[in-house]
Image (cartoon, rainbow, N blue to C red):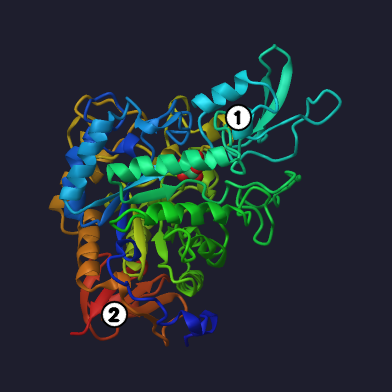
Amino acid sequence: MTSTQDAAIPVAATGTHLPAPGSEWWRTAVIYQIYPRSFADANGDGLGDLPGITAHLGALADLGVDAVWLSPFMVSPQNDAGYDVADYCDVDPIFGTLADFDEMLATAHGLGIRVIVDLVPNHSSDQHRWFQEALASAPGSPERARYIFRDGRGEHGDLPPNNWESVFGGPMWDRITEPDGTPGQWYLHIFDSSQPDFDWTNEEVREEFRRILRFWLDRGVDGFRVDVAHGLMKKDGLPDYTPPADGDSMGGEDDDVPYWGQPEVHEIYRDWHEVLAAYDGDRALCAEAWLPTPDKTALWVRPDEMNQAFNFPYAMTDWNAPALRLVISESLRAFSAVGAPSTWVLSNHDVIRHASRLALTGESPQGEGIGPLSVAQPIPELGLRRARAASTVMLALPGSAYVYQGEELGLPEVIDIPDAARQDPTWFRTDHEKYGRDGCRVPIPWTAGSPASGFNDTGAAWLPQPAGWDDYARDVEARDPDSTLSLYRRLLAERRAHGLGSAPFTWIPGHRDDVLAFEVGDVTVIANVGTEPVELPAGSILVSSEPFEGRALPADTAVWLIPA
Ligand code: GLC
């Protein structure tokens, strides 16, 4: 078969990646996502905590990560696992105290690991003091003006102000009862009804978030992962919008979705850029902005805005060589064009773990999750094999890569969580139609044969761990040179040794269409995304996603080669 692959690649993508200037660590960093609820539980209550993180940071230094990002640990009723914040400047007692945070930060810095915290500016919890004040105040009051309250439609105002649907299912509006007991105004919530959206046209909201940024910057954090960074501004007049029937919550590719990516949102990040620039130490902002293309995503990382944006178009690409070539090329081109590094990510706390997602028997339902009755079911061995190959490709790419806790152990999505144990609001808001994201959030295993596989020493776990979790335990994998953990350690060490994060990237022509072949610096990467073996070019194997004999690269396997 002759190669047709080059036709799909924009020429500008080859060799255009900007080198890393100076100390801008975020251009090349491998950033490990800690999901605090499920990482390590020091007090044994079944929910992870900050002292648990501090105690296990050594394992992450050993893995070779440059930074960690912590999902929210601030005061929260935990209706959306902490993405519903009631007090932005304190630690929820279930995770510890501010002193525990300071100790964790100092320990991380002592190990050479930077720390990014999650900031949730689109919405607060309904338990936030401001929302409680809004409920107790009159329509039109300054207290209401911090959120998006509107009168309802219809003669008695009993219809929601527009037709928007919440990302978690159901209407995006809830009606309140006014302090005098009468049916009242409606408030907007893109997510759960317990997560009211702030009104970012209000200067008081903007000033409050500058204060919150400075609070954490003063404590010494290295940056922020900004939750729903594309949602803060809503289109004037809040016009009706109907997403395409087969689309996901991002909307159609060319749609002007009135609550996503409105142009005015960028003023906010230009302002935050200035706030961070006043601090030393190269602090960084990373946008969580679910947008359908790299070009759209790159708008968040123009030189006077954020530093990174998650590359979700890459994360959402199937195990398919032409599609991967296209998204990699498009990403390098689009981010380079604005002087930003591309990021690379395969898993996080909102999507089906890639060890399962990459080998589903049907179409991937992504954020909707999978459970025992889902049409699409993972093929476990194939999924793990592809995940190891996909990570071997990802960790060679120039730019910054994100690793979600447990993917370095090859953890699969947990499918058979008992219904009664499920926690994701998606599960409840869709009347159990969509399983949601619990399957990627199960507490991770540390030591085989211990209570809760070493997550704590009591055996409690906020989501039940499945049978067989011990097989993935870190101590077991640390002893096995062929384990996924050993693979990640090698990938991270060689990525650093060969400077791949800032090395020039070039596709290698002449390979089969179902093969990915590229050079990054002095490393050649070959990934067999097809079904037939591929004869390897010259070079000695530096890292391989699977052990194999000879020079024929098996299906679903990737290697890094260096000159012999
Ligand atoms: C982001 C978070 C997700 C959360 C949502 C609402 O997408 O990653 O976990 O549910 O925002 O805050």
Horizontal arrangement in the rendering, residue 223 relative to residue 323 (left or right): left
Q: Find residue 242 and report its horizontal and vertical position in percent.
A: 73, 47
Task: For residue 378, say whether it is visible.
Answer: yes
Which residue in the rendered view is the most extreme toward the left?
A: 479
Q: Residue at x 30, y 35 (%)?
A: 467
**Please, what secondary structure does the residue beneath circle 2 have?**
loop
How far apart, in angstroms, are the residues tagged by discs 1 and 2?
51 Å
Q: Amino acid at mark 1?
A: Asp
Q: Find residue 521 and report its horizontal and vertical position in percent.
A: 29, 79
Task: For residue 466, say whether it is visible.
Answer: no
Q: Amino acid at mark 2?
A: Gly
* The C terminus lies in quadrant: bottom left
Q: Find residue 138 and report its horizontal and vertical position in percent.
A: 68, 21
The residue lying toward the viewer, choosing from 510 and 462, is: 462
Labelled disc at residue 97: none
Q: What residue is shown with label 2?
A: 521
Question: Is residue 447 depicted above or below 61 in this figure?
Answer: above
The residue lying toward the viewer, choosing from 34 and 19, is: 19
Question: Is residue 538 depicted above or below 227 in this figure?
Answer: below
Labelled disc at residue 431: 1
The residue lying toward the viewer, choosing from 102 and 242, is: 102
Question: Is residue 393 depicted above or below 178 in this figure?
Answer: below
Closer to viewer: mark 1 or mark 2: 2
Q: Residue at x 64, y 47 (%)?
A: 259
**Please, what secondary structure does the residue beneath circle 1 have?**
loop
Callout 1 environment at 10 Å: few (<14), some (14 to 19), or many (20+)? few
